[in-house]
Amino acid sequence: MKPFTLLLAWYWSFSLSTVKLTVIRNKKEITVPVTVGVADGKTNTLKAGEESDTPKAEAKAGKLGVSVRPLTAKEAKKAGTSGLLVGNATGAAASAGIASGDVIVAVNGQPVKTVSDLSKAIEGKKQIAILVQRGGDQIYVPVNLDSSED
């Protein structure tokens, strides 16, 4: 077993769900939260030689606490919807139950297809209702933005 795999197995044996991982990126040391758990089998992985069609544009909606990017045409077709794919959720979004892999379809009934749409939809709001697609299901998630940090 590789050392990283052993480390994760050790943490998993203590039922910790989130750990802090220090990595070096662009010659700088950063610490990121990593959620340790069992994969649900619905993750997309690339096989050797395949190219990713993931767009490079990704942005954060700071008040909400999500890192998002627009779905690719291929992802939108597979999901049967358009929206923003959540890469990471923290703060208000995570507290409300939004997670990595969710697709934000609409905010307060207004479709969101771009990061700009999301920013405009939450601007000046204290509470919002986000329509999220998770797997094949769509659910409304109420989010209290008042308790998050700007």
Image (cartoon, rainbow, N blue to C red):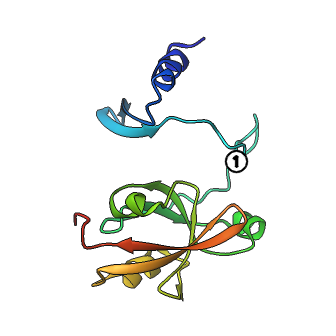
Q: Quadrant of the N terminus?
A: top right
Total marks in image? 1
Q: Could you tell me which residue is drawn at 52 percent across and 60 percent down?
A: 86
Q: Quadrant of the C terminus?
A: bottom left
| Residue 106 horizontal/vertical position (percent) | 54, 80
| Front residue (pair 103, 13) | 13
Residue 51 located left or right of residue 97: right
Q: Could you tell me which residue is drawn at 37 percent across and 30 percent down?
A: 23
| Residue 6 horizontal/vertical position (percent) | 52, 15
Can you tell which quarter of the image residue 76 is in?
Answer: bottom right
| Residue 101 horizontal/vertical position (percent) | 58, 56
**Picture layout, residue 9 above or below residue 121:** above
Find the residue positioned furthest to the bottom. Answer: 109
| Residue 58 visible here | no
Q: Could you tell me which residue is drawn at 33 percent across and 72 percent down?
A: 144
| Front residue (pair 39, 14) | 14
**Picture layout, residue 111 above or below residue 40:** below
Residue 127 located left or right of residue 12: left
Residue 129 located left or right of residue 38: left
The residue under label 1 is which amino acid type? Asn
Can you tell which quarter of the image residue 143 is in?
Answer: bottom left
Badge 1: how crowded within 10 Å, few (<14), some, or many (20+)? few
**Picture layout, residue 66 above or below residue 139:** above
Give the residue number, with chain letter if any, for mark 1. Answer: 44
- Label 1 secondary element: loop
| Residue 100 visible here | yes
Q: Could you tell me which residue is drawn at 50 percent across and 21 percent down?
A: 13
| Residue 89 horizontal/vertical position (percent) | 43, 56
Residue 139 located left or right of residue 120: right
